[in-house]
Every structure is written in C-alpha cells, then in structure tokens.
C-alpha cells in the first residue's frame, strides 16, 4: 500500500484529502505545519507528498527546497491558494513535480498523483542497475562515463542525435559519453521532442502532451523545463544547438550542424 503525506494547515482540507486518499487505497499521514512535515519526511518513507504552499513555522517552498537538498526524491504535488504564476514556477524550480491551485477537485488530485507516480516508477526501474554501475566509479562526479555498444541503426529504443543518446527503455541520457541525471519530467520532455526532430512544437502542445492537463496560458512551465534541459545537454546555453527557440511559438529539437 502506497503511503502519502498530506501537509496543510487547514483541518478541513487534511480531513477531506485523507478521506478520499484512504478511500482510493492509500495509507495517509498528515501534518499541519512545515517543521512537522519536514521531520516526517526525514524520518519516514513516503511514496507521495501533497504539500501546501502557505504553512506556519516553515512554508511549503522551504520544505520542498530542504527535502530536495537532502536528496529526498519523493514526488511532490504542491497546493497553493495563490493564483500566482511566479509562485508556481518557483515551486517547480525547487523540485516540486506539479502544482494545483485551491479550490481543487479531488478526482483531479488523484488523477495527477497517479500520473506522477507512473512516471516516477518508470524512471526508478533502471535505478538499481545504474546504482550498481555507479558504485564502481567516483561518487563525487555529477556525470559518469558510460561504455555502451553503438546502438543499431534499427533500434527504436534508442534515439541518437549528434552527441546525445537517449535510451528510452533504460530512461538514461548520455551526452558526449556521459550519463546525465534527469528528472522523470525532463526525460519525458526530451524524449518527446527528440522523437519529433526538426519539428516545431508549440508551448501549448508540449503542455498538453507532457503535463496532460489544461495549463492554458501558463506556458512558463515549459520554458523552465527547457532551460533545465539546455543546462544539461548544451555546451553553450546562450547558443543552443539542439533545443532552439521558435520565437512567438515554441521550440524545436534539431540535429546540430
């Protein structure tokens, strides 16, 4: 049974979410302030965290930031009563996997949880194999040299573009022979664009296909993730040669000249 932590200072919201999550088959713990939540996150194992932004003692942004700094990778869905795009973007940049604005629909909460957990679990499938390989190499390295046979030309599970190799089944990306750490969302976005090489993709299209919910008008989410990808795959983020901007429309993943 998957364990969920619900963090909100409003008793009514904690009660409502707990009721619906338990009804859906989850084991639920709750906290009403940020300090208690962080203590629970550090001391217990959870499969998912629903985290309110505005909390006493320690706000949701700080909880999320500290958890990610401590390498706690549990998926986080952030709740906010503020219909403020900047707050949402900051939450995503700090490591939240998604956000919802209050008031929210309980069915949508469950749907988003399931979608995030599916992506997270797929990403985790290859981790034991990767960890065993990485233990033989220097733990101080952020990127790790990989020795892989050259992909066959007809291997649909591998996308090779320039110096980038995307292993779809292993959820691994090599850039100039080095394995690059990516979040499930970053990997999904990169793979989607690489499968449509040289095709211009609008921000709205990427929102619909990658986030799978109606984020119309909130395309800054795409820009943030594109920026993160460029930092990981481009030699010069100011002059990207793989992910280029199509002004006023969106982005294109290209074969470099």
Image: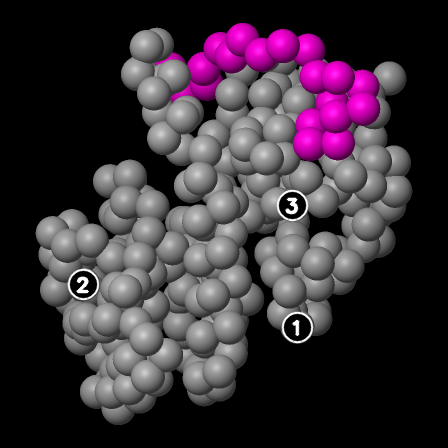
The residues tagged by marks 2 and 3 sit, at their Cα atoms, a distance apart of: 31 Å
In this orientation, which residue lies closer to the viewer: 84 or 145? 145
Give the magenta-colored segment's residue range: 141-160
> At numbered mark 1, what does the secondary structure look like: helix, strand or loop?
loop
> At numbered mark 3, what does the secondary structure look like: helix, strand or loop?
helix
In this orientation, which residue lies closer to the viewer: 238 or 79? 79
Instruction: Residue at 81%, 24% (x, y): give it.
Output: 154
114 lies left or right of 75 = right
Instruction: Residue at 66%, 22% (x, y): give it.
Output: 165
In this orientation, which residue lies closer to the viewer: 110 or 207? 110
Q: Main secondary structure of the magenta part?
A: loop
Q: Circle 1 sits on which residue?
A: 214
Q: Circle 2 sits on which residue?
A: 37
In this orientation, which residue lies closer to the viewer: 136 or 177? 136
User: Can the viewer see residue 220 in this picture?
Assistant: no
Instruction: Please say if 54 is above or below 120.
Output: below
Rate crowding at label 1 as few (under 14), some (14 to 19) or many (20 or more) other CA atoms within 10 Å.
Answer: few
Instruction: Please say if 113 is above or below 152.
Output: below
The residues tagged by marks 1 and 2 sit, at their Cα atoms, a distance apart of: 29 Å
Question: Along the polypeptide, which appears first: circle 2 or circle 3?
Answer: 2
Residue 136: name its quadrant: top left
Instruction: Please say if 69 is above or below 9.
Output: above
Q: Residue 82 carries which label?
A: none
Instruction: Residue at 26%, 76% (x, y): give it.
Output: 8
Q: Circle 3 sits on which residue?
A: 189
């Amino acid at each position: 049974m998957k364990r969920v932590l619900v963090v909100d200072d409003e008793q009514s919201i904690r009660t409502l979410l707990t009721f619906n999550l338990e009804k859906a088959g989850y084991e639920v713990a709750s906290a009403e302030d940020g300090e208690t939540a962080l203590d629970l996150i550090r001391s217990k194992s959870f499969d998912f965290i629903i985290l309110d932004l505005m909390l006493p003692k320690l706000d949701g942004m700080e909880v999320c930031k500290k958890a990610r700094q401590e390498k706690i990778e549990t998926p986080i869905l952030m709740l906010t009563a503020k219909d403020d795009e900047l707050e949402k973007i900051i939450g995503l940049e700090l490591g939240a996997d998604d956000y919802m604005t209050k008031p929210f629909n309980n069915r949508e909460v469950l749907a988003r949880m399931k979608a995030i957990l599916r992506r997270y679990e797929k990403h985790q499938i290859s981790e034991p194999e990767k960890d065993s390989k990485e233990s033989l190499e220097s733990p101080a390295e952020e990127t790790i040299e990989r020795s892989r046979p050259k992909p066959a030309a007809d291997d649909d599970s591998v996308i090779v573009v320039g110096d980038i190799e995307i292993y779809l089944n292993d959820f691994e990306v090599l850039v100039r022979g080095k394995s690059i750490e990516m979040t499930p969302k970053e990997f999904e976005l990169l793979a989607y664009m690489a499968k449509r090489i040289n095709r211009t993709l609008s921000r709205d299209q990427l929102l619909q296909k990658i986030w799978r919910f109606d984020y119309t008008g909130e395309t800054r989410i795409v820009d943030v993730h594109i920026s993160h990808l460029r930092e990981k795959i481009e030699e010069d983020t100011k002059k990207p040669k793989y992910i280029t901007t199509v002004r006023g429309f969106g982005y294109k993943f290209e074969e470099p000249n």
